Image: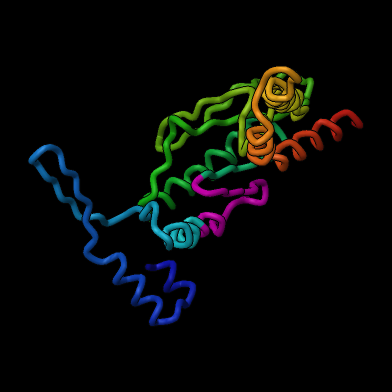
Amino acid sequence: MNVLRAYECPSNLFNLARSYFTQRSAYLTTNNYRIQREVSKGCPQGSCCGPGLWNIEYNTILNLNFTKHTTAVTFADDLLLIIRGKSVMEAENFANIEMSKINAWSKRNKVGFNEAKSKTTLISRRKRKEAKEIEIYLNNKPIEQNTTMKYLGTVIDDKFKFNQHISHAADKCAKLIFSLSKSAKIHWGLKTRSLNNNSQRSDPTALTVRCTSLDRRSQV
């Protein structure tokens, strides 16, 4: 409600939203036992206005006072922080500063981040000898460091070469082509009607994007 007030939401819509969030309860029924709890945080899932209300709430994290070394990207309930530094230690320090801001935001807005599902990847092509292990904390717990990170279907590696992403996309395309080839045999396979349905259910957009990635990589 504070976010709607900050956005100068019209009074009629503000009162409607306030009524929507007032006296909400969650029920759990097991056998003959029923538990009721008042809901004071969270966003209703499966509702028509749930995504819009979530975007209004989650958009405030992009307005945090991040340093000039940081770029924040959000998608649905995911948050990606891209942090630059002249050295590994500097990037690590900047990252922990930004994580402290996110921790404060999560407590203020009653939104929790799962540190067990959070990952960090150090991207560097420098050949100088320096420590590659970094310690970044979320909720006072260290975040797991990996050499690769999958974000929105893209595999990002620690050298930013996208070789593993190309292999991943090629494997998925090969499996799709193999499944389609089994249906295209002359003497066995699916009938014409099933083939038409199968071709309509395939994902041409995904194939186009992946093939474009392969083409761009081959030209480098």
The residue that appears at 38% across and 52% down in the rendered structure is: 45
Q: Position of residue 108 (x, y in %)?
A: 38, 55
Q: Is residue 158 visible?
A: no
Q: Nearer the viewer, residue 31 or 12?
A: 31
Residue farthest toward the right in the current orientation of the protein: 219
Residue farthest toward the left in the current orientation of the protein: 32
Q: Position of residue 215 (x, y in %)?
A: 86, 33
The residue that appears at 47% across and 44% down in the rendered structure is: 100
Quadrant the N terminus occupies? bottom left
Residue farthest toward the bottom in the current orientation of the protein: 11
Q: How is the image coloured?
A: rainbow
The residue that appears at 75% across and 28% down in the rendered structure is: 162
Q: Image check: 105 left or right of 190? A: left
Q: Image check: 97 left or right of 122? A: left
Q: Image check: 58 left or right of 90? A: left
Q: Nearer the viewer, residue 3 or 18?
A: 18
Q: Is residue 64 visible?
A: yes
* Res. 149 image quadrant: top right
Is residue 68 highlighted in magenta?
A: yes
Is residue 78 highlighted in magenta?
A: no
Q: Image check: 134 left or right of 40? A: right
Q: Position of residue 52 (x, y in %)?
A: 48, 62
Q: Which residues are magenta?
A: 59-77
